[in-house]
Image: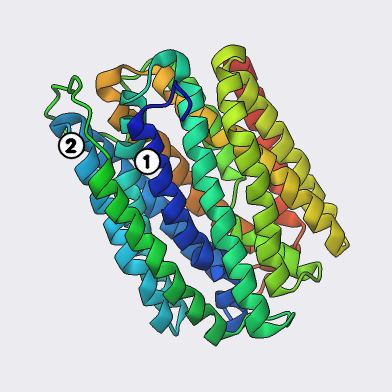
Amino acid sequence: MPRKLSRNVVILGVVSFLNDISSEMTISILPLFLANVLGVRTPIIGLIEGVAETTASLTKVYAGWISDRVRKRKALALTGYGISALSKPLLYFANSWLAVGIIRFADRVGKGIRTAPRDALIADSTAAESRGLSFGFHRALDTAGAVVGLTLAALVVYLGQRGTLMLQRSVFQKLVLLAAVPGFLAVLTLAIGVQDIVSATDDSTAPPRLSLRGWNKQFYGFLAAVIVFTLGNSSDAFLVLRAQTLGVAAALIVVLLVVQNITYTIVATPAGALSDRWGRHRLILAAWSIYALVYLGFAFAQQAWQAWLLFAIYGIYYGISEGVGKALVADVVAAEKRGTAYGLYHTAIGLTALPASLVAGILWQGIGAWSGFGPSAPFLFGAMMAILASFILWFWA
């Protein structure tokens, strides 16, 4: 164990590792289940994903504020992981897009409850000079779980379908049952292994506000850039669907996601450690630039092999941005308000995730009598928004 990593950070990494095995075995190919099995169109898929992410983010601000008030970050994290572990197995019975949407809603409520308290607990358990390393390490283990989960999913899909392009219901149901095991193990590991850190509390008795007032300019500027970026950052479900339009079969799409997450895992810890020395803003600017290039690549891609390259590079963006962004939030807010700050950070992302995914679905396939612009349109829009967000962050930094 690296000396700069606390026990809590390591155990929370293991929890995320197990939980991501569970999630990626099902949620990663849920867009294929919706499109191939249930025949759902992309605007509805965008609606489901947008509502799910917005629900999670709106929940995070209250969960973070409560954790600041009661100093019970572990209990809230445990509740959130428990809700997700109980809800995902219900996908086995889903036979309509509405049922899938309700289950995704419950799963994202669980994520919303756990995320801000968990991130604040990581920050509370880490010295300032190692913050980037700790968040990078946590993201690396989280994504290593995704690699394992996706690898298992690819194996199950391959054995069940033997290269068939369209996903089958029976194969998806097997994945849901298998995924339940690591989900419940994650809850057990958190309950046994993690300890709360006693820290200062926020004495405010007012409920958290979905307002940016009362925070410093550094926090405000970063959130402004994040909001603009997220407007073009539609759900990764559209990347999965785009790969299928390029001729990648269902089993190989899962392998594509494995490649992406392997890159993510390799990059996350050194990127976090580098941000401790080189500066968070520079790393985030680099990540957003990579994102813009990848989305332009998806817009103009014409062959299946290009999807493999783009997914691998996309993992570099994730590996840099996720942990470094969370470390930056801890840098610019007071320790006693970290839970609320993480809640606001995720809420800002979630409030724009819904329109981002809706816009992507409409740009792709249209709505009503309008037929849309085709598969390239959402990715061109996402690249433009990433470039604009980079200019905002560069100006502020």
Q: Which of the image's four quarters has the C terminus?
A: top right
For residue 256, say whether it is visible: yes
In this rendering, position of residue 232 left or right of residue 69:
right
Q: At 72% from the left edge and 63% from the top edge, which residue is drawn?
A: 242
Residue 103, picture quadrant: bottom left
Q: How is the image coloured?
A: rainbow
> In the depicted view, which residue is nearer to us: 197 or 228?
197
Q: At 72% from the left edge and 83% from the top edge, which residue is drawn?
A: 162
Residue type at mark 1?
Leu
- How packed mark 2 is, by other alpha carbons closer than 10 Å (few <14, some 14-19, many 20 or more), is some
In this rendering, position of residue 202 left or right of residue 174:
left
Can you say whether 138 is above or below 352 in the image?
A: above
* Dot in front, 2 or 1: 1
- Residue position marked by numbered label 1 in the rendering: 12
Indicate the secondary structure of the residue bearing disc 1. Answer: helix
In this rendering, position of residue 109 left or right of residue 359:
left
Image disc number at residue 79: none
Q: Where residue 304 sits in the image (x, y, percent)?
A: 84, 64
> In the depicted view, which residue is nearer to us: 176 or 4?
4
Can you say whether 1 is above or below 347 in the image?
A: above
Q: At 75% from the left edge and 62% from the top edge, which residue is drawn?
A: 375
Residue type at mark 2?
Lys
How far apart are labels 2 and 1 at the CA level? Answer: 15 Å
- Residue position marked by numbered label 2 in the rendering: 72
Q: Where residue 277 sits in the image (x, y, percent)?
A: 58, 13
Q: Where residue 95 sits in the image (x, y, percent)?
A: 44, 85
Residue 176, picture quadrant: bottom left
> In the depicted view, which residue is nearer to us: 131 or 45?
131
Total count of labels: 2
